[in-house]
Image (cartoon, helix red, strand yellow):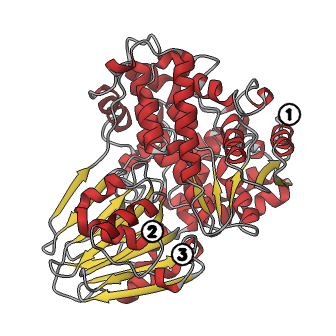
Amino acid sequence: MCGIAGEIRFDGAFADTSAVARMTETLAPRGPDSSGIVAQGRVAFGHRRLKIIDLSEKAGQPMIDPALGLTIVFNGCIYNYPELREELIAAGYDFFSHGDTEVVLKAFHKWGEACVERFHGMFAFAIHERDTGTVTLARDRFGIKPLYYSETDKRIRFASFLPALLKAGDVDTDIDREALHNYMTFHAVVPPPRTMLKGVRKLPPATTRRIDADGSVTDRVYWSPPYERRPEDTGLTRDDWRDRVLEALRVSVRRRMVADVPVGVLLSGGVDSSLIVGLLAEEGQKHLMTFSIGFEEANGEKGDEFVYSDLIAERYATDHHKIFVPSDHLISHLPDTIAAMSEPMVSYDNIGFFLLSREVSKHIKVVQSGQGADEVFGGYHWYPPLANSNDVVGDYAKVFFDRTHETLKKQLGDRWIADSNVSRSFVSEHLLRGGAATPVDRALRLDSHVMLVDDPVKRVDNMTMAWGLEARVPFLDHELVELAATIPPEFKLHDHGKGVLKDAARLVVPHEVIDRKKGYFPVPQLKYIQGEYLDMVKDALGSKPARERGLFRQDYLETLFADPASHITPLRGSELWQVALLEMWLQSHGI
């Protein structure tokens, strides 16, 4: 797990190594163990390393293979790299290291861009071909590893962290009005390639991009599983699906144990993380480190779920660590949390993951986490109402969108309103394309391949990597997801959602963590903004930069200030926190 950066020139000039150095330095938290920069004429790569596999300097980056004429910077982990390495050795390749980076490099030489289809893992990489000048960028199927870029007619720069591109300079930092519409409407999700800034874009997941020496670009989407039933599965029972899911999850968790350092678990006490702990115990993992976090109550809403995480920790005799965050400690770390965001992310979970990751990083470098289970197995409350939908676009928007286009017009400053309802158009196009059999399948596909990537997955990457911690997500193993996509929706929706996953969990973990109300990282202080939290957001939204920007109408802000707790979105988020977080993120990065 690492941070990558680079520049590719098209104007005959040498790559700007000082710009690459500034980006690489900004990536230091992602890779605290070592760094390197390599320049070859018009191309320069930078890298920050977190040592997880092959701890020797032989696996350092940027990695050059002069015999093959290839240079790589790679961020992520390929879980099946030992098997691929053996296959490549049998094909005649020699290896000088024992890690996964060199496997990616030689796999690319043998199979070209199609090598990504053989990888089980999370990854973003750039490979420069010496003899042709071509650079290939790639991102894993779920965008678990980020890859941002900025481009002009003279060059392209890329980095694992959006603010690193800002440090390099020469970026158009005007607000993208369509991205702003997405943020305010599509529950803070800004789909690729857009970001909040006009001058920064992100490579979509499951995509390879070939950049030729003349600057021409060719993209290829290499994975898009069908959300349809297979004839050979006709007649499978609920128990059959349960057994298939459990076996696929066992394989996924086992894959994510590969490391030359210990692997722990972020244990919320919910069914997803508890199931991971249980499966690791089945694999014979002893003295497993687990970590939970809790916050103070606010407005009568409890701020922790320790009763359930304690139950799992005791059941499996884990080395358990509980972190309790008092309110004054929470507010003091919000600025650092916001600074760690590649993009403005409105979820209250961010501060929880940030502080939890800080504590975890004192003990270990790798954790498994339960993100993705709700999107893959139908755990959210908005899926059941879609089961009999005759208007999947309208019904989805009704339960997921934070506000309508007409309402947004009354809240944004005039110059910031998009020309059309771009969020509704995007969702409509995605939901109605072929390859999904039912309205629920369509919603699961949208949430798994768009919302998940630019909300929970991005949140976990940003907050863990801020502390040099690698997070692995077994529910996003692509073979597990391909299986889940074929399961009839009724098996997912029963038992108040995630039914088939709960059926599998009953064979592994205590029923108490399954038969309870759905939980999450509760941070009630950020939902019911009052006292010093209200003062903080008022200061940000009333500051000179905010007034000059004029993103929001003053009468709308005054309404929110007067009674924050009365303005909660359909998905139970604070409208005031949503607008304040955006402004604080912009200010945090000097935009």
Amino acid at pointer 2: Asp
Element under disc 1: loop
Q: Which label is found at residue 516?
A: none
| Residue at disc 2, secondary structure | helix
State the separation of the CA atoms marked 1 and 3: 49 Å
**Mark 2 Cα within 10 Å, few/some/many (few <14, many 20+)?**
many
- Residue drawn at x 76%, y 52% as measured from the top left: 533
Q: Is residue 415 visible?
A: no
Q: Quadrant of residue 409?
A: top left
Which of the numbered marks, if any, corresponds to residue 300?
A: 1
Q: Nearer the viewer, residue 150 or 67?
A: 67
Q: Of discs 1 and 2, which sits in the foreground?
A: 2
The residue that mark 2 highlights is 100
Give the x, y percent position of residue 241.
Answer: 52, 23
Residue flagged by tag 3: what amino acid is it? Asp
Q: Position of residue 371 (x, y in %)?
A: 59, 44
Quarter of the image where one finds residue 43: bottom left
User: Which of the two labelled residues, at mark 1 and mark 3, occupies the earlier sequence position?
Assistant: 3
> In terms of sequence position, does the residue under pointer 1 or pointer 2 come before the other?
2
SS class, disc 3: loop
Query: Disc 1 and disc 2: Cα gap in Å?
Result: 49 Å
Give the number of the mark in front: 1 or 3: 3
Q: Measure the alpha-carbon separation of dots 2 and 3.
A: 8 Å
Q: How many marks?
A: 3
Label 3: how many Cα within 10 Å (few below 14, some 14–19, many 20+): some
Q: Is residue 297 above or below residue 236?
A: below
Q: Hey, which quadrant is residue 271 in on the image? A: top right
Residue sitting nearer the eye, 424 or 554: 424
**For mark 3, what is the residue?**
54
